[in-house]
Image: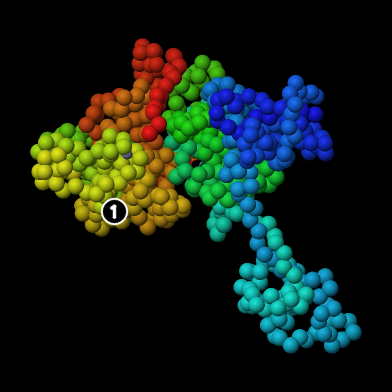
Amino acid sequence: MIAEVIVNSSAQELNRIFDYQVPNDYVVGQNIDIGYRVLVSFANYKKLEIGYIVGFKENSTFKCKNISKVCDRAFDENKFEVAKWMARRYFCNLSDVLKLLVPPGTSNNIDKIKTKYERWVRLTSNYKDYIKFHDEEKKNYKIKSDKQQKVIDFLIDNNEIPVAILMDVVGTTASVIKTLEQKEIVESFPMEVLRNPFLNKIVKRTKKLDLTKEQQEVLDTIKLDTFKEYLLYGVTGSGKTEIYLQLIEKVLESGKNAIVLVPEISLTPQITDRFLARFGRVIAILHSKLSQGERFDEWRRIQNGEARIVIGARSALFAPLKNIGTIIIDEEHDSSYKSEITPKYDARDVARELAKRENASLILGSATPDIRSYYRALNGEFSLLKMDKRISSFGMPEVTIVDLREELASGNKTMFSRALYDEIKKNLENKEQTILFLNRRGYSTFIMCRNCGYVVKCDKCDVAMTYHLTKNKLLCHYCGEEKKNVSICPECGSENIRYFGTGTQKIEAQINKIFPEASVIRMDVDTTQTKNAHENILKKFREEKIDILLGTQMITKGHDFSNVTLVGVLAADSSINVGDYRAAERTFQLLTQVCGRSGRGDKKGRAIIQTYLPDEFSIQTAKSQDFLKFYNTEIKVREKLNYPPFCDIIVAVISRSR
Ligand code: ADP
Ligand code: ZN
Ligand code: ZN
């Protein structure tokens, strides 16, 4: 039997099938099949190459080498079909896609991630032979060492146990255990352990809530057991997540499994907590902030059926989940669903291909749907589900727009308008929490010589460098390059250097000055480098020890803090003037999402948007949180200018390697 093999390589000329002989002791359908990974010797390379079996045939026209080693099964039929679709649609090598289907960390080295073992101990099967007994029934024994006796007593009652725990509970030492081992009274053995990303996490279990009429109708509309696409458009706080939870409960009851995609890593602690609280450890999470070992083990829990709900970033679509009943994409408008690295893909389209083949329902949810998705829903491609009421009886937050030009004219040069200042004061007095949003990190955003106009730029990227206070250095936000501060102009020697622009670090310093009584926590790329940083910041804020959460994009979506009653957008304009046909859409989404963090609990919420462009329609419609109005205007603009969804745009990037 001949196996058709795709070799793991992104070289274009190797993007084809190679024939290999199946070893004699392998039978197709039993211990080898389509989707298995193999090691093969290739060309005259010394190292064996990883390959994927994609088909079989009786004979080959070539003289074929033997497969050197048969490894694990990486994908099933459905995933393979989706992979072929992706390779065609996104112009990449099949192996670039197949790489996504293998356990994390193993795409270039199958054995790289090791299963983790712990040392356990138990009594040997004939331990009684080595102990002196005082009675016939071999019950009362006494050995010389009290310490050793304690361990034996414990093991008689408790069977087997990890060495570390034994030492802890009995208060014994490694040398005591070792002595017992030498006497052949106990033996140690390796036991496989799974690295658990939820270790030490205590989450109170929740029961399903009684749905509102609006929610119940939506849930009843979603069909199980058949491929169908839905766009769930529900305003912020309308209870979409609760619908996801109850839908999944139904799916699990029917014996099927579920995938939930969430856009950003900062969102995952909260949403995974909600899933963990409802379902316990039948969930698995997959995202880049986990260690490779943790991801590997979560993957295996999915593979062996222990985990039935997969929650993660876009790549969670490729998890080895069988029998998928539903795929949910939360905040479907989010740009992180598009992969900009090879293979480049749109997770929403890939999810559709997978759902089709699994006969699953596909649910795209958002308070600010992608224009393209909404257009397709109106054209009947998706079934449109709407929820326009908040669960909280206080309704949507009251949004005010502040014209920064007027502030400046009246002599206010700070980043806090009088209106925003007053509202923050009020919140501090009432012990309610505030979220402040600014889409620029760092301290000053560019450094310029006022004498000659020289701007400090990154040598590699030619973009202005940002001053970072905590590091006391200049940083390139493109490539991470660092430079020393400048106080003398390298061009003209002038000392007239000024730091312009405002980033989150500077705002933090200003808050400390203007509101000395307030506690502030900052969340941006710089404060969230370490593994649990996001989670710790959000946890602190949630436990209401902090008055003000200040941050970039990552604070704008998904969070549900019931005590937040004020949201301030410090400068709404930064996303309007970018040269992209989606600038208005992005601005509307961002502002609506961030304002939507306000007033989600049992108090009315307010939001203040500061801007130099108060008449901009994306800002005006965000003020009224009116997606339909925004959509109706924007879709006309798109049609007139012939932009998507009325055409397709392809970006061709030409780059030279450095
Ligand atoms: P969304 O995902 O649309 O932003 P959530 O599902 O987070 O909305 O719901 C907003 C808040 O309302 C949450 O605190 C949630 O626990 C609560 N909630 C949702 N559905 C119900 C319900 N049926 N009854 C009571 N509270 C609910
Ligand atoms: Zn750079
Ligand atoms: Zn100069």
Residue 95 in the image: state x and y as whole percent.
60, 31
The residue located at (24%, 29%) in the rendering is: 614
Kindly identify the residue that appears in the image at 74 percent across and 88 percent down: 144
Residue type of the residue flagged with mark 1: Thr
Image height of 230 relative to 470, above or below: above
Q: Position of residue 287 (x, y in %)?
A: 52, 43
**Percent of width and height locating residue 396:** 39, 36
Front-most of 487 and 584?
A: 487
Task: Please give the name of the residue rendered at 82% of the width and 85% of the height, measured from the top-left corner.
Answer: 132
Q: Which residue lies furthest to the front in this view?
A: 44
Residue shown at 77%/28% (left/top)? Answer: 2
Mark 1 sits near ligand 2, with its Cβ under 8 Å away: no
Quarter of the rendered image showing ligand 2 = top left
In the figure, 614 relative to 455: above or below? Answer: above
Left or right of 435 on screen, residue 76: right
Image quarter (top left, top right, bottom left or bottom right) of the N terminus: top right
Secondary structure of the residue carrying tag 1 is: loop
Q: Which residue is disc 1 drawn over?
A: 470
Residue neighbourhood size for the residue with mark 1, other residues' Cα within 10 Å, grouped as few (<14), some (14–19), many (≥20): few
**Residue 3 makes an appearance in the image:** no
Looking at the picture, how far across and down is residue 339, in whole percent?
48, 32
- Most extreme residue toward the right, as rendered? 136
Q: In the image, 73: left or right of 198?
A: right
Along the horizontal axis of the image, is 426 left or right of 362? Answer: left
- Asked whether 128 or 382 is in front, the reply is 128
